Amino acid sequence: MKAEIHRILQNPIYTGDFRWHGKVYRGSHEPLVAKDTFASVQDVLNRKPRARYPKRRHAFMGLLTCARCGCTMTAERKKNKYTYYRCTAFHGRCGNAYIREEQLAQLLGGVVNNIQLPERVANAIKARLHASQAELEQARSRSSARLLERQRALQAKIDRGYDDYVEGRISDALWARKSAEWETELATVTAELSAIERPTSFVATGERILELVKRTGILYKTQDPADQRRVLDSVLSNCTFDRGSVCPTYKKPFDLFARASETGEWRAQQDSNLRPPGS
């Protein structure tokens, strides 16, 4: 559509001329547009487009909502030097305050610190994960052995029943009924066995989460705002701002770490049920 409009605007036929084999000739028809107007249009069409520069992406845009009215917090640059965040006031002025990006970064640093784990606690959780994985493997091994034994027994029943059927020792109706029962049970056992034999290791995932929790504070403090935002996106599902304070909502399982840190549960458990084996 755009190309068609350009073609029409560049056609000299509207000025009383016409183009033939690359040359412009004077026509006998009445012009619809003055030539100076046509020339001005050509200048506009042939003008080089102005360079478009990407809009500045503020680090914490889209991360915060206003705790007072629920609107999004937006950012704006002042004096080409300072970045301020404020409520968009889409529902009207709510009385929330502005905050400088540097101050906001410090507040959000506290949000990250809330999920920090003491080294002893992290090691205790890791030891518990390994112990739980070992218990799970033992239970899986016992269930697998039981199901394999049941699978062999059912197959033996089917084989013996077929031999009896071929030899005429059981009727067609009895063989049809019993074989259907055995085949159904065998299919169920085989499916359960297949599900049990799938790897279910959660230790690697748990260790990655623990490592991330241990490093978030250091990562946050040493990164620029854009990288700080990536750290926050990893641990937060929502965050509200109200006149100099933030209220985070953590993703799982980081909400558990934040809650334990807030209640002091880590300190209470360091020397009790979270103690690593042999410590």
Image (cartoon, grey):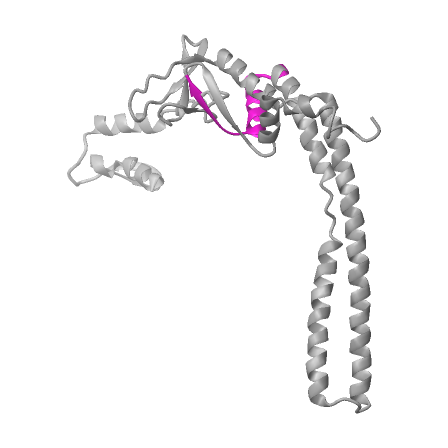
Task: Give the image quarter of residue 78.
Answer: top left
- x%, y% of residue 19? 30, 39
- x%, y% of residue 27? 21, 39
- x%, y% of residue 143? 77, 56
Task: Give the image quarter of residue 26.
Answer: top left
In magenta stretch: residue 225: yes
Q: Is residue 175 above or below residue 37?
A: below
**Quick one: 231 or 126, which is closer to the camera?**
126
Quadrant of the snapshot with the C terminus: top right
Seen as rendered, the residue at the extreme left is 30
Seen as rendered, the residue at the extreme bottom is 168
**Quick one: 220 or 25, which is closer to the camera?**
220
- x%, y% of residue 51? 43, 22
Identify the residue shown where x is 75% and y is 40%. 132
Q: Is residue 245 above or below residue 230?
A: above
First to last magenta residue range: 222-242
Seen as rendered, the residue at the extreme right is 278
